[in-house]
Image: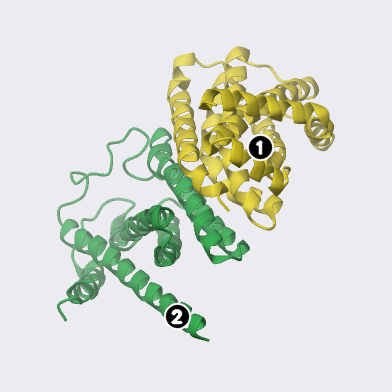
């Protein structure tokens, strides 16, 4: 029980953000109108994706240092969950863009960068599939993961700031900061971010444990 | 032998190998020239500066993937093992990167020359465009060398190379295209300083991570 408090917290926070996100009062802004509610769903997906991919990076580094196969499992499972969050982020973003910018794909640098970042991690999975032997697979895919991560950081955080973007906080606009956001959104937004990140960690944890059991039964047979 | 001497010898070895079996080098040069010619026959004439620039970088992208894929796959396992016993992994990756930079510069100069010969286009700031092509070849060489090392470990290295490298090279390509477009339009040079900074920063990141990671990659 005392170990599962954060899982309960995750469920409560996500439930709260869904209910509050749909029902609470939001500021009426031109163009955005009621679609502003999407901020509680779209943005947390990206935060969670970045957290999951960072976890994957950290575990890849650990794998190269100690060759413990569990670290490799953790790296690939957090990358998997990160990719799911990334896809959800793209989908929620596309729906939002359809209503506010007019088209689902508006050639926005952040949108493009996010799609490319997903390609990088899908390539990571393809690379894993093409390697048969476990230790070699772990080592080489870890090398690719670590090599790709800094480039992805450039892609997601530096390039969109160099060009004009429809997203807030780009193209010379002030960055994403607490001052830009309407105060009434914050009590829902922050819990949503934390809730979804915890959710991601939880899903990764479950998948990691399933893989470990699978490996164990494989070894016994 | 210290690192510097090892690198010098390994680069000499690469160049000698290349000159002895000229087919690889000639093959890649022929590849560029025929791609440009295919594009010429398909397009006939490029109307806008933007298309001209984009087409050039696409040709460069495919040519450089083709040129650099072989840098690790070409060598037999036994020979690689031999290098690893006599040289440090750092020396091997640095020498490969430097050799590939030379190769890419040669390749890009020929590509640019032939490309601007067939597709005639007024250039605002030719020297700066040349700089963008040079920076582009250096960056392609540094990224693709490491990726080709990774891809060579998998069973179908050649096919994997494109999948692994394209998404990683896109950020660079976006910045390069913007930089070279600025040069084509003859904008003031200070406009492009941001882009040059980002390209150099990406190169520094890529070379450092390659140096850190290559020792883990080659051990089999």
- Provide the residue designation for mark 2: A216
Label 2 chain ID = A
Question: Which label is found at residue B61?
Answer: 1
Determine the secondary structure under disc 1: helix
State left or right for residue B24 relative to residue A82.
Answer: right
Q: Is B210 rendered above or below residue A123?
A: above
State left or right for residue A71 relative to residue B39.
Answer: left
Confirm or deny contact between disc 2 and disc 1 (CB under 8 A): no
- The x, y position of residue A122, in whole percent, is 53, 59
Question: Which label is found at residue B173?
Answer: none
Determine the secondary structure under disc 2: helix
Front residue of this view, candidates B80 and B31 = B80
- Do we see residue B144 in this rendering? no
Q: Which image quadrant: the N terminus of chain B?
A: top right
Viewer-side label of 2, 1: 2
- The x, y position of residue B209, in whole percent, is 46, 40
Per the model, the C-alpha gap separating discs 2 and 1 is: 45 Å
Apparent colour of chain B: yellow
Residue name at image x 38 percent, y 58 percent = A59
- Do we see residue A148 in this rendering? yes
- The x, y position of residue B96, in whole percent, is 62, 33
Q: Do discs 2 and 1 share a chain? A: no
Front residue of this view, candidates B116 and B135 = B135
Apparent colour of chain A: green
């Amino acid at each position: 029980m005392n170990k599962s408090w954060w899982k309960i917290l995750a469920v409560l926070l996500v439930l709260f953000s869904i209910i509050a996100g749909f029902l609470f009062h939001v500021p009426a802004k031109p163009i955005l109108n009621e679609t502003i509610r999407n901020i509680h769903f779209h943005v947390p997906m990206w935060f969670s994706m970045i957290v999951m991919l960072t976890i994957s990076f950290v575990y890849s580094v650990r794998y190269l240092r100690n060759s413990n196969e569990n670290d490799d499992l953790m790296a690939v499972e957090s990358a998997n969950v990160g990719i799911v969050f990334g896809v959800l982020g793209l989908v929620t973003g596309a729906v939002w863009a359809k209503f506010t910018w007019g088209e689902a794909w508006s050639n926005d640098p952040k949108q493009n960068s996010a799609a490319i970042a997903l390609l990088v991690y899908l390539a990571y999975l393809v690379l894993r599939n093409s390697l048969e032997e476990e230790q070699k697979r772990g080592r080489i895919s870890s090398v690719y993961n670590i090599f790709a991560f800094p480039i992805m950081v450039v892609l997601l955080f530096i390039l969109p700031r160099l060009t004009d973007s429809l997203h807030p906080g780009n193209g010379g606009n002030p960055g994403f900061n607490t001052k830009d956001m309407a105060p009434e959104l914050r009590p829902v937004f922050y819990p949503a971010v934390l809730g979804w990140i915890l959710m991601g960690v939880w899903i990764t944890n479950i998948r990691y444990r399933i893989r470990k059991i699978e490996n164990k039964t494989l070894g016994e047979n | 032998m210290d690192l510097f001497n090892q690198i010098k010898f390994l680069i000499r070895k690469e160049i000698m190998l290349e000159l002895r079996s000229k087919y690889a080098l000639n093959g890649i040069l022929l590849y560029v020239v025929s791609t440009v010619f295919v594009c010429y026959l398909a397009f006939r004439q490029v109307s806008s500066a933007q298309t001209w620039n984009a087409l050039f970088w696409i040709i460069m992208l495919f040519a450089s993937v083709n040129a650099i894929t072989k840098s690790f796959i070409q060598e037999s396992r036994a020979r690689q093992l031999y290098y690893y016993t006599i040289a440090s992994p750092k020396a091997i990756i640095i020498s490969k990167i430097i050799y590939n930079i030379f190769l890419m510069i040669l390749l890009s100069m020929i590509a640019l020359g032939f490309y601007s010969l067939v597709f005639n286009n007024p250039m605002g700031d030719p020297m700066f465009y040349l700089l963008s092509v040079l920076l582009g070849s250096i960056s392609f060489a540094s990224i693709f060398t490491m990726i080709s090392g990774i891809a060579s470990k998998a069973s179908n290295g050649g096919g994997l190379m494109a999948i692994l490298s394209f998404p990683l090279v896109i950020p660079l390509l976006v910045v390069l295209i913007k930089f070279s477009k600025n040069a084509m339009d003859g904008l003031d040079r200070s406009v492009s300083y941001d882009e040059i900074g980002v390209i150099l920063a990406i190169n520094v990141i890529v070379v450092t991570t390659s140096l850190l990671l290559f020792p883990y990659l080659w051990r089999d």
